[in-house]
Amino acid sequence: MSVELPLWRAIALFRLLTLAYALVRYLAAYQHYAHPAAGWLYMGLLTVWTLATARSFLAPERCGWPLLSADVAVAVTGIVLTRVLDDPQRVLAGEATLPTIWAAGAVLGFAAKGGWRTAALAGGVVGASNIVERGGVSVGNVHNIVLLLVAGCAIGYVVELARASESALARALQLEAATRERERLARDIHDGVLQVLAMVQRRGAEVGGEAAVIGRMAGEQEAALRALVSSGPAPGGPAPARRPIPRPDEQPDEQPEPADPAAPQDLRALVGRYADTRVTVSAPGTPVLLPGRAAAEVAAAVGAALDNVRQHAGEAARAWVLVEDEPAEVIVSIRDDGPGFPPERLGDAEREGRLGVALSIRGRLRDLGGSADVSSVPGQGAEVELRIPRPRGAG
């Protein structure tokens, strides 16, 4: 109803302004009426009705069809009474009716409530009462009826378009929320379940025996789960802050609890946990502060990049992580000395359901308003560059 609310308020204001106009017109011409006292009685009724229903016209849910029908009835009554109360010569000369243009407000109410078809119906009823008041069809009342129908139908058509647009927007927002949740779940699955299944498959093959059977089953489940996760990934929204991804040789209790998402965190400390004999981490000497959630997500993206190095470049590959603190953004680069890969490999991996780069790295940076660029040349290793914009006002 948010799209229609301004229109209903405009109609409510229109009714008040046209009421004032009708009163002024009658005050200037009542002495020419054959029955001025009866005319004042109707104008009093019109004033009471307009003021009593003004609040209802401010909210469409309070303005139902009975009220709108009564509004048209008040307008039609005033138009027909004009033939009885006014001087016959004035009626034939085409003088204004008692409600004058106030009657158009009743047609606009039908347009806002039911669209152009109901507006045409109400406009036709009001137009017919004008013909009855004049005693026949004339150029003047035909002109007024056409204007009334055009205005009512045009506004009714606009209302229908607004409702259709609002409905489409609501469906789009629902779809966007669903795809965001799907991507968040896919990211969590990739960061946890898929990596564990892959590790079980590798270790089972190394041990042999029954462990090899378990490893083979884990590999089958990994393939099936990857296919499910990759069946409809879409660009998404925010994901909850997560801890950096542990390496297979790390114990879960070595990872600290997630920080308060609202508290600034030093990115150096989060990324520094990945340093070991094969991973070199370089960072500025001063704290690199980011909001807690952003820092945790960047650290998780770094962990995903290093996990790709271990999986595809081998356990012996070396990696270098560089944290750069710029005034407008923070840049984190992850470079390795592995064999590299051809440019088309990333697209092939995503189609195969291997979404480490698409979700765990690019997805996280996209949610933060940043970017993740992956480049590689066969035989020269690979490099991932993460760019995270600083929030406005952050130093």
Image (spheres, rainbow, N blue to C red):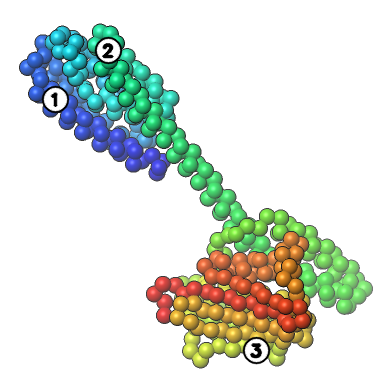
| Residue receiving disc 3 | 280
Q: Secondary structure at mark 2?
A: loop
* Residue nearer the viewer, 362 or 52: 362
| Residue receiving disc 2 | 138
Q: Amino acid at mark 3?
A: Thr
Q: Amino acid at mark 1?
A: Arg
Are the residues tagged 1 and 2 within 8 Å (C-beta)?
A: no
Residue 25: assigned label: 1
Mark 3–mark 1 Cα distance, whole angstroms, equals 88 Å
Residue at figure coordinates x 56%, y 84% from the top left: 323
Residue 292 located left or right of residue 362: left
Looking at the image, the residue that sits furthest to the left is 31
Residue at figure coordinates x 20%, y 18% from the top left: 97
Image height of 40 relative to 238, above or below: above
Question: Is tag 2's residue or tag 3's residue first in the polypeptide sequence?
Answer: 2
Q: Amino acid at mark 2?
A: Ser
Query: Can I make out residue 52 in this image?
Result: no
Residue at figure coordinates x 78%, y 64% from the top left: 222
Q: Answer few, some or many: residues within 10 Å of disc 1's Cα (few below 14, many 20 plus, some between 14 and 19).
A: some
* Residue nearer the viewer, 66 or 160: 160
Looking at the image, the residue that sits furthest to the front is 139
Please tell me whether mark 3 or mark 1 is closer to you in this view.
Answer: 1
Q: Secondary structure at mark 3?
A: strand
Image height of 388 relative to 8, above or below: below
